[in-house]
Image (tube, grey):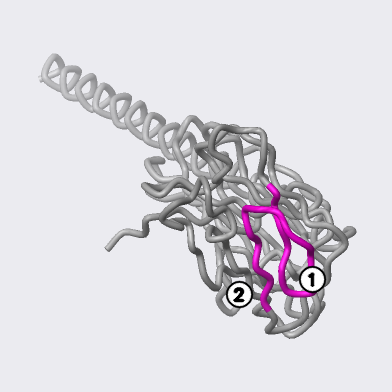
Amino acid sequence: MKNNRGWIVWSISRIGVMMAVLLITLMVFMIYRYSTCVSASDGANQVAEGLSRTIMNVYAGPVGIETTYRLPAKIGSQEYGLNIINADKEGVLINVPGTRCGMAKGGASFRAHLESYPEPVKNATEENVTLVIRNREDGVYIGRMDKCSGCIAIDEFHYDAGDDCDNLNGEYVRFRNTCDAQCNLAGWTVKDKIDDRPEYTFPSFVLNSGSTVTLYTGCGTDTTSEVYWCSNGYPCNAVWNNDGDTLYLRESNGFLCLEYTYPQPT
């Protein structure tokens, strides 16, 4: 009987040790899992807060300021997603999927009201400002541009004049100011994509609200509604290729505010 009792006591003690080891292992796993989740969330919060501060710095800075916020390749060794949100609470939300806690999240609010993302948006409190936030390969681009960045649209594009090389002024593009205020286009440039030729630069020129200005490829005398590229020095001085091209309109500071590719998809 004594041998049996000793065996029973030994077995119970072994079971107790195993249960203690299992409990300690479970506790270590839970602590590790918790710390992993906290680390991922903390990393997401840091990225969100850094981006939010950068957005607010640009928002509060002078017109024309721009920067790129560099995003880390991973957060907590995990790939992650970025959202610029504008619901009841404006801000930045970082999602880190694939963590042991399922989905780690981090966020930060900012006072700049965004009407849309990632397209250029107007500052809700300052009529002369456009806030631009765009995802790019090198990070998040943030710019605070003059409101006219989003005001100039193509009203008519006559890129095929038939006899383009001899009828340069039969080739033209007409721009319209779609906003409620004047836009000073002095120093703005127009360029095509395919041909390697000098860009056109607007002279001192103010485009009134709702008004249009036509840019002709050939030579002529500028007026309040017509300007002339006076393209020259090539075997054929036509600018716009009839079979397809891209027009780039940039502000005087180089910011691309309009990109138009033709032919348009049907």
Please state which amino acid type lies under the numbered disc 1: Thr
Nearer to the camera, 235 or 151? 235
Of marks 2 and 1, the one in the foreground? 1
Please state which amino acid type lies under the numbered disc 2: Glu
Q: Relative to residue 86, is residue 139 depicted above or below? A: above
Q: Relative to residue 160, is residue 28 depicted above or below? A: above
For the N terminus, the image quarter is top left
- Find residue 17 and report its horizontal and vertical position in percent: 32, 24
Residue count near mark 2 (Cα–Cα under 10 Å), binned few <14, some 14–19, many ≥20 = some
Q: Residue furthest top?
A: 3
Q: Does the magenta stretch include residue 226?
A: yes
Asked whether, in this view, residue 21 is left or right of residue 50, the answer is left
Asked whether, in this view, residue 94 is left or right of residue 24, the answer is right
Q: Relative to residue 24, is residue 160 depicted above or below? A: below
- Find residue 75 and report its horizontal and vertical position in percent: 54, 36
Question: Could you tell me how far apart the alpha carbons at marks 2 and 1 are, in whole angstroms?
Answer: 36 Å
Q: Name the residue under label 1.
A: 223
Q: Is residue 176 magenta?
A: no
Q: Name the residue under label 2.
A: 115
* Number of numbered discs: 2
- Find residue 178 and report its horizontal and vertical position in percent: 65, 79
N-terminal-most mark, 2 or 1: 2
Q: Residue at x 41, y 55 (%)?
A: 162
Q: Which stretch did the figure color magenta?
A: 212-230
Classify residue 181 by image quadrant.
Answer: bottom right
Classify residue 266 by image quadrant.
Answer: bottom left
Asked whether, in this view, residue 185 is left or right of residue 83, the answer is right
Nearer to the camera, 100 or 237? 237
Which mark is drawn over residue 61? none
Residue count near mark 1 (Cα–Cα under 10 Å), binned few <14, some 14–19, many ≥20 = few
Q: Residue at x 49, y 63 (%)?
A: 158
Q: Residue at x 70, y 81 (%)?
A: 211
